[in-house]
Image (cartoon, rainbow, N blue to C red):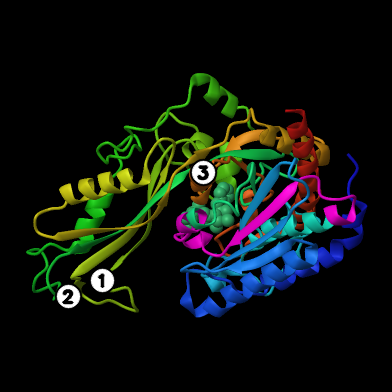
Amino acid sequence: MSSSSYLDSQKERFLNELLDLLRIPSVSADPAYQKDVVRMAEATAEHLRKAGARNVEILETPGFPVVYGDYFVDAALPTVLVYGHYDVQPPDPIELWTSGPFEPVVKKTELHPEGAVFARGACDDKGQFFMHVKALEVLIHEGGVPCNLKFMIEGEEEVGSAHLAWFLEQNKTKLSCDLILISDTGILSNDQPSICTGLRGLSYVEVSVTGPNRDLHSGLYGGAVPNPINVLTRMIASLHDADGRIAVAGFYDKVVELSAEERAEMAKAPHSDEAYKKALDLKGLEGEKGYSTPERASIRPTLDVNGIWGGYTGEGAKTVIPSKAFAKISMRLVPDQDPDEITELFSRHFRSIAPESVTVEVHPHHGGRAYVSPIDTLGYQAASEAMEATFGKKPIPVRSGGSIPIVALFERELGAKSILFGFGLDSDAIHSPNEHYGLFNYYKGTETIPIFYRRFAALSARH
Ligand code: BES
Ligand code: MN
Ligand code: MN
């Protein structure tokens, strides 16, 4: 399949348009950016309209709006729903960025010799959802759109998509489709394409431990009262056993184990522990006994403390026994763990290990189920053929460790499978300082998406 000459002729403009979007600080987690998030929704709608989408609307939710647009060709053709998110993670720690998080610049790196755009959201997910907007424009200029398209770009993914279950229920007909296409994941490397075939689920909780009714002088009271930080850290330390397994009772009950064949298949994907350690400046790795690094980071559930605080953390020393200590804890889940059930199991376990001297509270945050996408579908085949056409190499299926909770909901509410057609790299530093997205990846995705639609329409016609 030949590459797009329209794309080649428009590359510079396509890049500049992305840079403009990256200047909008659409941080959904921080109310200080609320107006910018709304402005980003408007800019997204405008771009969809300009690319040629019809029925473009900004659909309100109790939170940030969903941008919708479509391109109807023929009722006899299949319909693909493109999902993405226009919100981004907070940029902090800002001081570790080498250029402003919302002042996008193109810089060359070892992995991106042709340059990469540095900005918050460059890869996750503005650069990736925008490839779909540009792919629509390319198709309209080059012989037409081969199937029906719908676009749904949301603004609350990075805060858990809390209103999307409601939104899907309200808009079932509007969003009805044969397949969902999402570019919000990655490939193994620019020489080895891959298709993401799985996402982990998530259960996120915040815990607090309360000891004395006020902060105390650690000399007058120390040694005689429960110190909530000591207690909390002791409790947290007990959540894993010596084999790296999670000690929450019942936690593994529903975990689907992979067969020896599936694990052997997984082990074929290129991976080096040495390179992995080197990229992270680590002297060693840690994880569940009996599993490889790629397995630990994708097909196995985890429990991680994401933040812990309490007591005095300011300048100098303050001798104090704090009244309270807190932690945020996330559990990545695999099929068939149920996030509500896991949250409940965690709560029960965490309370049960608390000494009587303190009060423990567990507040659940968002959650979502894991997703595994089958590879014997027309959608997967179309994705595989499209990538093979543009990369010159057949992609390998790879299960990822990240989460996009909406994907499991799509299947439940719309009865459709998702193809995770992302083009980022693990090294793109999503959620971290200096997030970037390779120009190679941006253009490759924009080139590959139209081919996906053509292949999907052709394969669907034969079935
Ligand atoms: N795009 C990511 C998820 C992702 C990245 C999956 C790379 C696979 C490969 C998404 O925006 C994200 O960050 N999801 C959150 C979950 C959400 C509920 C905050 C995550 O995985 O932590
Ligand atoms: Mn994302
Ligand atoms: Mn993200």
* Residue 432 on the magenta span: no
Using residue 96 as the reference point, say whether residue 384 is left or right of it: right
* Kind of residue sitting beneath label 3: Gly
Residue occupied by mark 3: 401
The kind of secondary structure element at disc 3 is: loop
Give the camera-side residue of 143 and 428. 143
| In the rendered image, the vertical position of residue 10 relative to residue 274, given as above or below | below
The quadrant in which the C terminus is found is top right
| Category of crowding for the residue at label 3, using alpha-carbon neighbours closer than 10 angstroms: few (below 14), some (14–19), many (at least 20) | many
The answer to which of marks 3 and 2 sits earlier in the sequence is 2
Residue occupied by mark 1: 311
For the residues labelled 3 and 2, say whether their Cβ atoms are less than 8 Å apart. Answer: no
Q: x and y percent of residue 146 in the render?
A: 81, 45
The kind of secondary structure element at disc 2 is: loop
Using residue 242 as the reference point, say whether residue 432 is left or right of it: right
Q: Residue 271: in sight, yes or no?
A: no
The answer to which of marks 1 and 2 sits earlier in the sequence is 2
- Residue labelled 3 has its Cβ within 8 Å of some atom of ligand 1: yes
Range covered by the magenta-colored residues = 139-168
Q: Which mark is residue 96?
A: none
* Kind of residue sitting beneath label 1: Gly
Q: x and y percent of residue 142 in the render?
A: 90, 52
Which one is in front in this view, the residue at disc 3 or the one at disc 1?
3
For the residues labelled 1 and 2, say whether their Cβ atoms are less than 8 Å apart. Answer: yes
Which one is in front in this view, the residue at disc 3 or the one at disc 2?
3
Q: x and y percent of residue 21 in the render?
A: 69, 70
